Amino acid sequence: MTRKDENCGISRWDLYKRELNNLSPEEFKATINKIDCCIIVDCCKPSEYEAGHLPEAINLNYLSQTLAEDLKQLNKEQAHFVYCQSGRRSLRVCMLMKNSGFKEVYNLDGGLQNWLTVFNEI
C-alpha cells in the first residue's frame, strides 16, 4: 500500500505560492510603502516593461540568458518586490531568489493584470 502525498491535487503554482510571500495588490502596495529601502523588480520582457510598469521598477527579463547574473547584482539583504504580467514568471523568479539566499522577497499575486483590476492604473 502506498501513502498519498499530502500535496496530491494541489497545483504546482499553489505549492510555490505557499512557499513565498505572495501578496494581493493591496498588500503588495502597502508593504512597499512600509519598507524604507526596497527594490521593485519587473521580470517581464523589455517590450512589456516599456508598455507599462510600476514606478521605480527595474526590468530583469525572466527570459534573458543573463537573468542569473542580473540577480547576482542585487543586494540579498534588501527587500525585493517582484511582479510580471500574470504572476507566473514572477513566481519562478521569487523562487530563484529565495533559493539563492535573498532574505526578503515578495511576489505580486496575479501580476500587473491583477494590480490593474484593483487600482486601474500603474
Image (cartoon, rainbow, N blue to C red):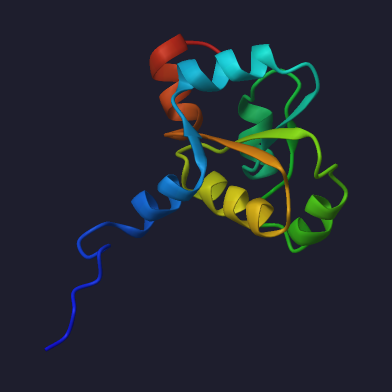
Determine whether, in the image, residue 107 is placed left or right of residue 120: right
Q: Is residue 112 above or below residue 60?
A: above
Image spot of residue 110 (x, y percent) = 42, 34
- The structure residue drawn at horizontal position 60% and vertical position 48%, both measured from the top left corner, is 94
Count the marks. Answer: 0
- The furthest residue to the left: 1
Q: In the picture, which quadrant includes the C terminus?
A: top right
Image spot of residue 22 (x, y percent) = 48, 36
- The structure residue drawn at horizontal position 64% and vertical position 25%, both measured from the top left corner, is 53
Image spot of residue 43 (x, y percent) = 64, 43
The answer to whether any part of residue 62 appears in the image is no
- The structure residue drawn at horizontal position 72% and vertical position 32%, both measured from the top left corner, is 79
Looking at the picture, tell me which residue is in the foreground, 47 or 42: 42
- The furthest residue to the bottom: 1
The answer to whether any part of residue 52 appears in the image is yes
Looking at the picture, tell me which residue is in the foreground, 64 or 77: 77
Looking at the picture, tell me which residue is in the foreground, 50 or 108: 108
Q: Quadrant of residue 52?
A: top right
Q: Quadrant of residue 120?
A: top left
Image spot of residue 12 (x, y percent) = 36, 59
